[in-house]
Amino acid sequence: MTLKNTKTPNYDQGKIGLPLRVKMNHNYEVTVTTGDIDQANTYNKVFITLVDTDGKKSEQTWLRSKHRMSAFSIGAVSTFTVSSPAPLGKLIMIEVNKQLNPPFPEVSWFLSQVEVKSPEGDTYNFPVHRWIDDCKVHQFREGRALKVSEDTTVTGMDWRKKDLTQRKKDYSWFVYIDGIAHCLKADNILDLPCEIRSTFTRGVEMGYTLLASMMELKLKGLDNCQDDWTTIEDINQVFCFRHTKLSEYVHKHWKNDDFFGYQFLHGINPMMIQRCEVLPENFPVTDDMVFPSGQWRLNYEMKTGNVFLCDYKLLDGVMTNTINNKKQYLAAPLVLLHRTPDEKLMPIAIQLKQKPGEDNPIFLPTDSKYDWLTAKIFVKGADFNIHQLNFHLLRTHLLAEVFAVSLLRNLPMVHPLYKLLFPHVHFTLQINFLARHALISKDGVFTKFTASGGEGMKTILRNAQSSMTYSSLCIPDDITERGLDSLPNFYYRDDGLKLWDIIHRFVQGLLGNYYEDDAEVQKDSELQSWIQEIFEHGFLSKNDAGFPSSFRTVSEMVKFVTMVIFTCSCQHSAVNSGQYDYDGWMPNAPLSLQKCPPTRKGTTSKATMLQTFPNISTTVHGMATVWLLSRQYSDFIPLGHYSEEHFTEEIDHKWIWGFQEDLKGLSIDIKKRNKDLTSRRMIPYTYLDPEKVENSVAL
């Protein structure tokens, strides 16, 4: 019987005498997800090839859809069929590229993930989370996390070597300032690979905020006004256009001694204060000076843990800036504080220069109103500069960049540590590039408008780099070394230690899936390359500060990774988020001072105080900058939230879920405490509430 309307089968030309075989296509169901972010879509032609562990490939397939215009729209999830003339083994990789599709222009496309179901019913996940902005073929690995020792196939090892070789070309080290942590080499923001750029949304919002602020200043004629302030009320007229609830409180209480002391614990820079058990030799304070009524004895109060010191010696001898042809001034003070029975931290002595002498008096609360207030203003000016350069720029931004560049150079996307850390360094390289060009460059805001701008800034950064230790980056060790373990109601410490413990537990559990013993750590060459480059380019191979140059044990690795995540999220939040709260009212945080520190008592007045403040232009540029850097933008990702799913294994998802639940619990506890503080008319401490901590240094 002859069948009608049938096609002639496609036969193989086999050897004579052997049966001929019909060619059978093996179909794979491929689901492609486009990112749900601004401008993620594309109308270009998209092609995909499936690759198995032996290197065998499917046909390159054009992913065509009946719904051509929406297959790769923002957030779209589209399914296609990909055929292979021969059965493939276990899939290890996909190859993706896009091509021009006239009349549509070539545009970048954010590929979120690809899921492939085989004819046998196996499912393979390929987390991509990358921008594809060219017509090259891009290879992406199956999502299972693998250390180098576990990636045993020839195809996998070849991809691993190729990937790292290309990464070392894309991410090169650069020395921006001699003597400080190195950074990424990039001459233009477009030189940054798409995978590490900030979102379009954040770029637009930051640009709008900056433009609106500068236009407002121009319209008011303030941006280039070189006049000095003549009244506090004039400063208030500018401040009232931009304020927060807390900045209003600062505005009202900045002169108060108890609030001055409070800020060393709960303000934007809780990193300077330390317990004082013995007075420094260059700070000759006596009982009669600080306790004239004889109510307390200084030695006894030091022994009982009630005396604290802030020493700004890193600022000593720093060359200061010249603004509008006028020399600026920066003190290097020592501040002594006393914890009173009602648990207030009160300043009791201030020396504005490091070397004691007749021209360097020790200022006291019993001095005249403006002598004492001027001394505190010079302390706040010093604190602004050391906070911004040491504790903010160097110890969060620049270190986070080192962690990121070494990660991108030494760990392939399939490495478990890459999957864990990439969300915590995402966007850091772009924000740091912008900071180098807009803030600390020759024409940057910090260079032009702060006392330490220019050569002074470089000196402070070098001093800070040389004094940095590993223990000072780990909050449990740092708190103990500064003698602050038992100080009551120290919320940076309380919240920070709880966050450290939560992060440590998460890191230990998740990485414990991949490193069963110390030998696993020691033989992971990619992991060791990561820490070695951090030691060399971040810590400048300093051997006497406790920094690891290799990992010998699981516990060493877990502690360091905990420090990395804490630094890039929690520590940055602690020293960044409240910038406008505490620095927006300029008298509380003068970025520069126009008169030298007083060399004798009785020479200050309200007029000299106003003359000491930075001029109008300097003030308003500083206010606009800290406003820009303190905002929470709409694409904010809180700590522990992973909008891009890099891990595909269920056990890893359980650890991530547990991490998120621990953070939720801590957030509830912090809110409850802050509600209680507010009910007692006290200031809530919010900067380490996990809901307000960003996942990475992205601002």
Image: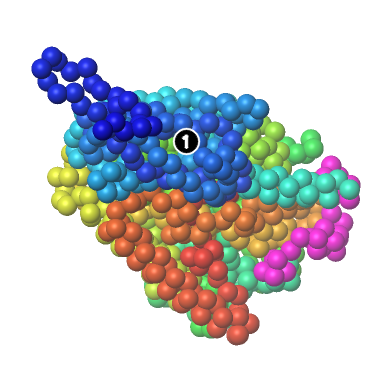
One can see residue 455 in this view? no
Mark 1: amino acid:
Leu
Among the 4 quarters of the image, the one containing residue 547: top left
Q: Residue at x 20, y 50 (%)?
A: 515
x and y, in percent, of residue 282 in the image? 50, 54
Q: Nearer the viewer, residue 624 or 115?
A: 115
Q: Furthest-front residue in view? A: 1
Q: How many marks?
A: 1
Q: Which residues are magenta?
A: 220-248
Q: Residue at x 33, y 59 (%)?
A: 653
Residue 241 lies in the magenta-colored region: yes
Residue 651 lies in the magenta-colored region: no
Mark 1 Cα within 10 Å, few/some/many (few <14, many 20+)? many
x and y, in percent, of residue 174 in the image? 48, 28
Horizontally, residue 487 falls left or right of residue 430, namely left
Q: Nearer the viewer, residue 682 or 542?
A: 682
Q: Residue at x 14, y 23 (%)?
A: 19
Q: What residue would you read off at disc 1?
A: 63
x and y, in percent, of residue 499 in the image? 40, 64
One can see residue 661 in this view? yes
Q: Furthest-top residue in view? A: 16
Horizontally, residue 592 falls left or right of residue 382, namely right
Q: Nearer the viewer, residue 698 or 103?
A: 103
| Quadrant holding the N terminus | top left
Which element is circle 1 on?
Answer: loop
> Looking at the image, what colour scheme do you see?
rainbow
Horizontally, residue 387 falls left or right of residue 465, namely right
Q: Residue at x 74, y 63 (%)?
A: 243
x and y, in percent, of residue 517 in the image? 15, 51
Q: Nearer the viewer, residue 148 or 432?
A: 148
